[in-house]
Each structure stands twice: as C-alpha cells, then as structure tokens.
Amino acid sequence: KTLEDVLKEKGVITEEDYKEVTRSKALNYKPGKGFTLTSADEKFQLSLGGRLQTRYTFTDADDNGTSRDSNKFEVKRMKFWLNGYAYTKDLTYLLQVDFVQGGSSKLLDHAYLNYRFVDEAQVLAGQTKVPFGRQWLNSSGSQQFVDRSTASDMFRPGYEAGVKVHGAVAGGIATYELGYYGGAGQSTFRTSNDNAYAARITANPFGKMAYAEGDLDQSEKPLLSVGANYYRNTLQKSTATAFETNNVTLAGSTGWLGKGIGTFANGEKIDINGYGVDAAFKWLGASTQAEYLLGQADGHTSDKTLRAHGFYAQAGYCIIPRKLELAFRYSFVDPNRDKANDQQVDTQGAISYYFNKHNLKLQGDVTNSHDQSKGRTDDMIYRLQAQVIF
Amino acid sequence: KTLEDVLKEKGVITEEDYKEVTRSKALNYKPGKGFTLTSADEKFQLSLGGRLQTRYTFTDADDNGTSRDSNKFEVKRMKFWLNGYAYTKDLTYLLQVDFVQGGSSKLLDHAYLNYRFVDEAQVLAGQTKVPFGRQWLNSSGSQQFVDRSTASDMFRPGYEAGVKVHGAVAGGIATYELGYYGGAGQSTFRTSNDNAYAARITANPFGKMAYAEGDLDQSEKPLLSVGANYYRNTLQKSTATAFETNNVTLAGSTGWLGKGIGTFANGEKIDINGYGVDAAFKWLGASTQAEYLLGQADGHTSDKTLRAHGFYAQAGYCIIPRKLELAFRYSFVDPNRDKANDQQVDTQGAISYYFNKHNLKLQGDVTNSHDQSKGRTDDMIYRLQAQVIF
Amino acid sequence: KTLEDVLKEKGVITEEDYKEVTRSKALNYKPGKGFTLTSADEKFQLSLGGRLQTRYTFTDADDNGTSRDSNKFEVKRMKFWLNGYAYTKDLTYLLQVDFVQGGSSKLLDHAYLNYRFVDEAQVLAGQTKVPFGRQWLNSSGSQQFVDRSTASDMFRPGYEAGVKVHGAVAGGIATYELGYYGGAGQSTFRTSNDNAYAARITANPFGKMAYAEGDLDQSEKPLLSVGANYYRNTLQKSTATAFETNNVTLAGSTGWLGKGIGTFANGEKIDINGYGVDAAFKWLGASTQAEYLLGQADGHTSDKTLRAHGFYAQAGYCIIPRKLELAFRYSFVDPNRDKANDQQVDTQGAISYYFNKHNLKLQGDVTNSHDQSKGRTDDMIYRLQAQVIF
C-alpha cells in the first residue's frame, strides 16, 4: 500500500484528490520500456532500460562440405537506451547504444530528436534505422525467430544519420516515411556530393499495427499491414574488396552488394537501387509475414550491373495463447542473378516461450541452410536464446 | 497538484511542514542538467542526462579550387552524463561519454572527482578538459555559433587525465587553475618521464561569469571576464607523420603542431609551449568575446623551432531578447609563422533561435573560409544544427 | 523530515501505516550500490551507479637497468552499471561497462541474466567473470592494494560469455560454480569446435564470506574461506606472436601463456589447463589471503609443453578500525618453469584510508618489483589512487 492509498482509506484525501495526485507518477515502470521518470510539470520524461540477448549456436556442418561442426556462445545484443520527451510532449528523443559493439563505430544505434507537428506530419533529425524493409524495421527484440531472416539481413541499409519526414494518417490506417541521409552508414559521416534516400509507405486497413512479430495479444479482430519501400544510394568502390564505407549493411560482407563487389571497377562510383514489398497479418494467435526484396547496382564507368533479389515468408501460431508459439520460415536469396550457383535457401522452424511477451522470452530455432556457394551444402544450425528487457 | 499540495490545502500539514517536506525532492528535473535523484539524507545526488547535436553541412567549394561541392549529415555529439555528489556535498563527480566516438579512445570525455575544501581551494583528480583557452573550456553545447572557431580548435590541448588545483576567490571575482597531466591526451595514458602542465587565471570584476556564449539572460548589469593561460608539454616524434600520441588535439591532424610536424626530426623530443589571453563581455543581450593564442615548439636535437599564432573575435546581439540572436566572428590562424601562404581566415555569421536557452536551440551559420594552403580558395560553408539537452 | 514522518507525528497515519508505506521506497540510495529504483509492485528493480579509480604511478627504475624513471596519470577504471531484477526477484541481471575501454572490445564487462531456482541451484547466461582465481573474482574495487597481484593477473582467464550453473549450500557454508564458455575471451565470440570450461568450489566453515579484501567490518567472529578452481581451454596459435584471440587474459601479452607463445608452432592448437587453490581469513580487523596458481599448455602437433606457476600471500590490519589499514604482499611468478631467469617477484606494502569502506577510499602502495627477465632489476613503483563509488 502506498501513502496515497492509506490517506484515501482514512478519508484524509478524497477520491478525486487521490486520482489527481496519482495521475502522473514521478517514477513508473512499464515492461518493455524500463523505468520512467517524469518531471512535476510533465514537460520532461525519461525512460531508461536495457535489452539483453544471450545466445548459444550449434552448427552441424554438412559432411560433404569443408566446415567442421562448431558452436558459439555470445552476448548477441546488450542495448541500453534513454528516451522520452523534453520541453513538450511533441519533442521526443531516443538514445540507444549496443554495448556489444565496444571498439566499433556501431556502438551507437539511435540518436535522434523527433518533432510532431501533428500525427500526420513529423520530422526526425539524427541517426535511426533507414526505413527500408519490414523485418529490418521490426526490432531485433520482437522477432518470432531467434533473429531476422537472411533475406532481410542481406538487403537492409542499416542505421544512418539524416532527416526523415514521416507521419501516420487516419489513426495509423496509412503511414509514410521519406528520408534523406549521408549514405555512409552507421555513425559514419562522409563529406560527399552523394547522398542516400529512402521512402516507405504502409497501409493498415484494419487499423494501426505495430512492428512486432507473433500475435501475442491474441487479436480478436484481424490485423493487416502491407508496405512498399525504395532505397537509393551512391557509393564509390575504393579498393578491390571495399567500398568507401562498409558500414552500409547491404554493402558490407554480408550484404548483396558487398558479396558482388567484384563486379565493379576500382575507383568507380556505383548507383544502388533497392525495392521491396511486404505484408503482415495477425489474428487469434496466428501471424504471417512475407517480404520480397530486390537490389540493383550500376557502375558509372564500367557500365556493369549487379542484380540481386530475395524473399522470405513466415508464419506462426500460439498453441498456448500469449505463451507458446511455433513458427516456420522459408528464406531465399540470390545475391547475383547473373551468376549461377550462389543462391542460399534457409528453411527454419522456431519454438518460443513468452514469459512476458517479447520482454522476457526463451526462443529456440533450427535452420537448414542450403548454400550453393559452399558446394550445395546443407548445414543444420541450432540456436537457443534468452531475452530480457529490463 | 501533488499530495503535499492537497494536504497543505486541507490543513493536514502546516505551511512549515510543507516547506520542509518539499525542500529536497527525491526526484527533480532542471533543464540543462537532466533528472536529478537525491538520497533521503541528502548526502548523495546523481543527475543524468544527455545532449544531442545533429547537423547538416553544405560546402560550396571555390570554383578555382580542386574540391567539389559537398554535403554532410552527422550526429555531431551524443553526450551522456552522470554527475552529482557523494558522501558529502563537497565531493562531486562527473562521468561524461560521447557515444558518437564509439570505436575510439575518445569515447570518454570526463571522469573525475573533485573535492572542495573551500571555494578558494579545490582539488580535482581524473580526466577533464585541460584549462587552456576560453572557447575550449566553454562547452560545445553553449556556443554562439554552430561550433568553436578554427583558432580555438587549432590551439586546444583537449581532454587529459591528471590533477588540478583550482578555486574561485571572492565569490568568483577571480579564478585560478593549475593542472598537472600525463601529457598523452584523451584517455591515453603514457608511462614517461615527460608531463604536461597548464595554468589559467581569470578576473571577473563585475562578478562571476559562467562559460556560456551569448547574453541569453539579458544581463541588466554588465559582465566582464578576462583570462590568461599557459600550457607546456613534451612529445616525441615517433614517425614521419605522427607523434607518440595523436590524442593531444594541438598535435593531431587539425592542430598547429600536427600540421607542422615536418619541421622536426624523427625520434626527437619536442618541447611545446602555448600561451593565450582572452576576454568576454555581456550586457543587455549583447555579447563579445576574443582570444589570442600562440604556440611554439622546439626540437631537442634538431634545434628547429615551429611558431604558430591565431585569434578570433566575435560579437552577438539578441534581436529578440533571450530568443533570437545574430552573431559575427572573425578567426585567423597562421600555423607556421616561418612559412608563407599557410594562413586560414574564417569570416562567419550566425543566427540562433533559443527555444530554451542553450538547452533547446536551432542554429545556422555561414562561413567564408579562406585557406591559403589550398591555393587561396574561398569556400562557403553553410551549417544547420539542432541541439537538445534532455 | 519526510511527509511520512510528519503525518506519523501528527497521528494522521499510524505506526503500522508508516512501516508499510515506507517499507519499499520507490527511490533509494545505498553506498556501493548507487541509486535504486523499485516499481510499485516490487517486481522490478534497477540500481545504477559508477565507480571511478584515478591513479598516479611513479616508477623509480633500477639504475642498473635500461629503463629511466617515469610517471603516469591515468583514469584506471570508470565503470558504469545497471543491475537489479525483472519480472521476479529470482531473475536478476547485470550490465556493466568500463568507459576507459573506449575503442576496445573490452568496453563491456558484464552482461548477464541469472535465474535462481533456489539458492543452491542457479543458472547464469551471458558474459561475466570466468570463475578461476579468488583475487580475480574479487572486484578491482574492493582490493586491499591499489590493484591485484601480478600472480593473479598472469593466470586469470578474464571475462567470457557462456553459461554457468552455480549455488550456495547451507547459507553459504559451501559454494560451487561450473561454467561453459566460448573460450575466445571478453566480448569475443568465436565459432569453433573448441570451448572453455571452469569450475570453482569454496568452503566457508564459519559462514558466508564475501569477496572483499580487508576486514573493514571488524568481524567479531573469525571468517574463513578456502577455494579451489580449474580452467580448461583450447586455443590456436595463428601467427608467431598471437593466438586466434588475445582477449583471454592469460593468453595476452601480460599472461603466462602469452609470454610463452614462442614455445609453440604456428598454426597448431594448444590445450590449456589452469589449477588454483586459495584461502582467506578475517578477524577483528586482521585479514590474510593467499593463492597458488598453476598453468600448463600442450601443443597438439609440436608436442611441446609450457608450464607456469605463481602465488601471492598478503596480510593486512586495520590500525584504526574500519578506517586505516596497513597491508603487505609477496607475489611470485615463474611464467616458464623450463626457462631460467624469467621469474618476477613483487614485494609490496600498502596503506589505505577508508572514508566509507571500499566505496570511498584513498590508497597508496609501494612495490619492489624484481624482474629476472629484465636483467634482475629492482624497480621501485609508487602508486596513489582515489576511488569513489557513486
């Protein structure tokens, strides 16, 4: 019992007084958000919290391949954030770091302020996720599997500093995002006459639908979201194996462009275009989501073109509502459509126990990873992960 | 209304009770400082907050030069701090990091504890700014322009670990600082028989004057501060292009010593002396500030000497008191006085809108940067920056 | 006086009400722990704080050696932590970073969650200290000297990600820890078919004894703890001077294995075994502690063996109870028992003033460091350190 409870019971304060004095608590906790501090005038609010993912991976390598079985322990993510509003509820901010990335420019994820003129018109300045790809925009903390699909990972631009105009129309029936960026990737700031652009729209005919996989709310009414996005950038190839920056994910070693860097001439600039369409649906504990992604890169002087595409489709169902979910996913990527035997197909099954939705969960998944580039090997990958948001 | 308000209104607690119980709030917010937690015994206090600067720069390169027009988006600074006192109000501490510096030893700015015997005699141990240069000591968060002047940047030593004896006399009419440092720069700890020293004094005849540019308090009485400082260090030149450390700002690529490294022989030790005088004045929304800085470096074995100097002068006026300010600055540097055609002159104008002083502001400035070393080119640099302290 | 105090005095609330409403405070401070936030339902708690060590070292080098006298200023440690429990008091977590390690993968110390089934059976997942070595497991913040002994430093594995099963039996009369790790060291996650293991047991016949040096509680009853531990790992030697990872402390440049890397052939895998026994005792302000450590490494293909051992013994006494302590330590290491003239012997004396136990203290120590490998030189090392936990 709090002091307010006692005073109300004794009749020292009235029911109305009680409501007023407890309306805004200076200190509050909400799962998934962390502890929240609010100033007395309610003009300032700060939440701080963290998210830990700790993972074990066992890889049963194909006997026909050259790899041996292996295993890995890792703290996959250790996020720490401060967010809230300042001076007015319309001016929000987010600072988020990932302490696993010590010693790397990838320490800083988000660092932005956002001003809401109205819901329909908002402007964000600073670093955040480039709005390209449903699964990429979906926090790594609210996935249905242990991590995102290979298709999503290979086509995502990553984090970037820039400005974004965005909004939600008619209570979230539709949303739009238009971003203008430096183009050099996470916490990497180039001085250049090139830039990156991204645009994304979604339609959510049955009402607002947050980016979080699995129907952990056991939605009584169906929820649907469809989206489309476009990304453009220009990067220079500086050496035989690297672009001017490797911090744009799709241009790094695990991205479609990074894998196909050999296509281009040293020193030339390359125009990059990315396209994607996606959809997600949830109802009564069932959820499904799919995304098709396409990339094309054109060398300015070599006149060479690299074309990549990929997709994933996944579905899950809570066999114990809100608690135990089974999910299945198929992911396909062809990082170079003009090259044979480089496709990768992942077939995955997952089982998740949600103690408190995505805030506290234990997830296991198993993947058959068929990689043509490694001699058509079929590796089996077993992963177990615990996540806590505190 | 708070519970205390209600109880006072109802006469449950007296006016005196009210004052006493609300005197120290366990949780409080103050703009520019962040949320503050205070222990019940008032022996411990911790404030935590952050400062975000997000910036866009467009450079209109001189057509006669070799550079092309370019632009840059960046999160310039993302500071996070914890400060307060512990065990007694006389023992204060500050921890501040800049998360933009992930992957760099420059992640940690301040990490010190300070003990106040009396205002006039205090000792600080740990890492903080080396006390050399008015504008350098002025937080990057309370500048009249988007950032510091080139003159200030080129002569500043940066952050260092060491000890500092300091104090304020007669309520701030005069201040002094005497520091003794490792000499290797920010978060860089050398084992050496060399050290760095710095000393700074200020006189503030009309009373204490904080380091913050612009007269945002619309001071009714004039405020004046004059200062002088000295810095000494010894660094070894280890390779053709680097000293034993590049983390002393003036010895790095943008400092006067770093630019003139070619003067010295490989392997020799170099004695560095820096001198500076400065003044600042504020009254009725007007403010002006100027600083003259001088550096000399002497090689032990080559007997070569490098001499540099520079200055800036700036003035601002709030055309809407406390809100809208215009400012003008002239900055001159000659990084090597014995070399022709290496001077840099920046002529700058700024406009700043202060929503809440330096805590929430939008600033734009334009610079004509005349650089003799680049063939007497005149680049025009346009910068726009939003800053929020939360 | 708090509002609760006033209301109790006035008889508005009863003694029982008072106890109930003040039982759990939303905001609390405890020295050594920092500020603690607790949710109203008491299911969530978060403490945040920091620990600063700032140090000055003067080395009076042996005149017969090649080194010259030198000195060093450093912020040795700047820890920041978030810890507490979430969803239930049995699920605890700890996030701790050391901001001095900016630019290094050693930024992240701890990142784990721990579930307590019962005191006797707990499981921890994530990154924390590998349980090998009493002094290593003793926080650098609660040492009797300025820092750990050379013997402890040379044999410790460091931090690692993995899983640990552990517990305390009969209220702490005995404890056990069994850990399974990746084996690549702090924040370093290898995919490999090798792993590391560690096991540790302690017996504490007179009751639970925390890892903290010095008898600062002036224990009225004697306290004794004896321990034994084992560590196993397999590392590949990748180049002439480096293993596949240098982030396992004992395999780094200051570890026994790192120093003896020349024993092995390039490319071969090496089995590493570590053994240790230790004891600590405290009574009436007196404390003593000793540890013997042994390491053996066997090359798979070269069939070469490297054998190392070392120990330290230290004792301290509070000449002013709880405040002023004198301590003495002897540390011996032989990093390669099959090689002559490589032993290091440190003889150390320390004086510590504890303003508030280990939470606020000033420590000085002097070391005679006799190093056979540097030509049997006797360097004298003087260190002064201030520590504050806020």
Image (tube, coloured by chain):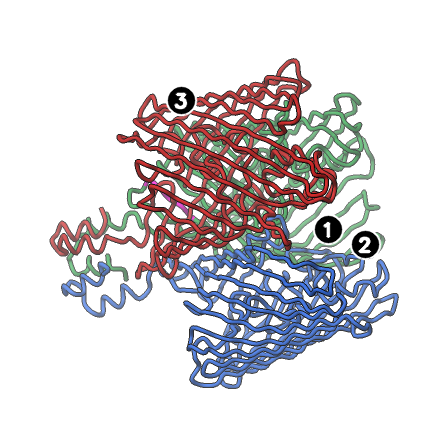
Chain colours: A blue, B green, C red
The residue to which callout 1 is attached is: B368
- Give yes or no for residue B263 being in the magenta stretch: no
Q: Is residue C69 above or below residue C245?
A: above
Q: CA distance from mark 1 to mark 2?
A: 15 Å
Labels 1 and 2: the sequence-earlier one: 2
- Give yes or no for residue B45 being in the magenta stretch: yes
Q: Is residue C42 left or right of residue B125?
A: left
Name the residue nearer the viewer: C6 or A87. Answer: C6
Read off the magenta span.
Answer: B43-47
- Magenta stretch, main secondary structure, is strand
Kindly indicate whether the residues beneath marks 3 and 1 are on one polypeptide chain.
no
Kindly indicate whether the residues beneath marks 1 and 2 are on one polypeptide chain.
yes
Q: Is residue B316 left or right of residue C209?
A: right
> Is residue A348 something that shows in the picture?
yes
Q: Which mark is residue C326?
A: 3
Name the residue nearer the viewer: B330 or A59. Answer: A59
Q: Which of the 4 image quadrants contains residue C123? A: bottom left
Residue under the image location 53 percent in, 27 percent down = C56
Residue under the image location 45 percent in, 43 percent down = C50
Q: Which of the 4 image quadrants contains residue A69? A: bottom right
Could you tell me which quadrant the N terminus of chain B lies in? bottom left
Q: Residue furthest front?
A: C303
The residue to which callout 2 is attached is: B67
